[in-house]
Amino acid sequence: MRCIFMVYLFIGLGGILGAVLRYGIGTWSGIQTETGFPLPTLLINLAGCFILAFFYTITTTRFTVHPHFRTSFGTGFVGSFTTFSTFGYETLELLQSGRYGLAAIYIALSLIGGYILAYAGIVLGSYERGQFTRVGRKQ
């Protein structure tokens, strides 16, 4: 029972930190576009794709971390730092205001950019001793 409580505690602490960082970046970054394009959310979500993939790769292949830390960082911190719900809501706002082109660009950049940055995180996370290993496998 104590172990499961600790997992939830660490996830909650990571979640607090991720949410506060997301709010700070989104609010205080000063990034605004005249078109209403949700650039702060896009940048946060893309960064989260890279960070999560990089972290999971290095903690699987190179470094051993406590499972509670891995869970608190991945599920807690990165999970609350990134925000799929805001992505969905902002996409609907663009569509409802007739900005179909911007909505399509936002969706494409979010999805394709997310995959590319997650892949980059895996590749860079597998970099070891001056060379890249095959993604997900040691050579």
Image (cartoon, rainbow, N blue to C red):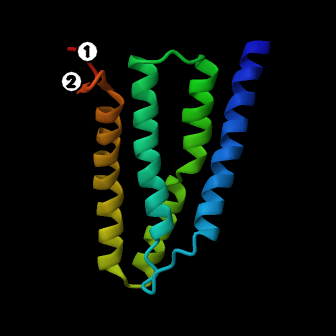
The N terminus lies in which quarter of the figure? top right
Q: What's the residue at 43%, 76% (across, down)?
A: 37
Q: How far apart are marks 1 and 2 (CA)?
A: 6 Å
Closer to the camera in the image, 87 or 133: 133
Quadrant of res 67: top right
Residue 60 lies left or right of residue 7; in this view the side is: left
Q: Is mark 2 on a helix, strand or loop?
A: loop
Residue 120 lies left or right of residue 15; in this view the side is: left
Q: What's the residue at 31%, 61% (across, down)?
A: 109
Neighbour tally class for label 1: few under 14, some 14-19, many 20 plus, Cα within 10 Å: few
Question: What percent of the width, then of the height, locates residue 9?
Answer: 75, 29
Q: In this view, does 73 lie above or below 136?
A: below
Residue 134 lies left or right of residue 101; in this view the side is: left
Q: Is mark 1 on a helix, strand or loop?
A: loop
Q: What's the residue at 53%, 56% (across, down)?
A: 85
Q: In this view, does 50 lie above or below 93?
A: above
Amino acid, disc 1: Lys
- Count of picture labels: 2
Q: Name the residue under label 1.
A: 138
Q: Mark 2 points at which residue?
A: 134
Q: Is residue 10 above or below residue 2?
A: below
Question: What percent of the width, then of the height, locates residue 75?
Answer: 57, 35
The C terminus lies in which quarter of the figure? top left
Quadrant of res 92: bottom left
Neighbour tally class for label 2: few under 14, some 14-19, many 20 plus, Cα within 10 Å: few
Q: Residue furthest right?
A: 2
- CB contact under 8 Å: marks 1 and 2: yes
Residue 51 lies left or right of residue 75; in this view the side is: left
Question: What percent of the width, then of the height, locates residue 110?
Answer: 36, 58
Question: What percent of the width, then of the height, locates residue 18?
Answer: 63, 47
Amino acid, disc 2: Arg
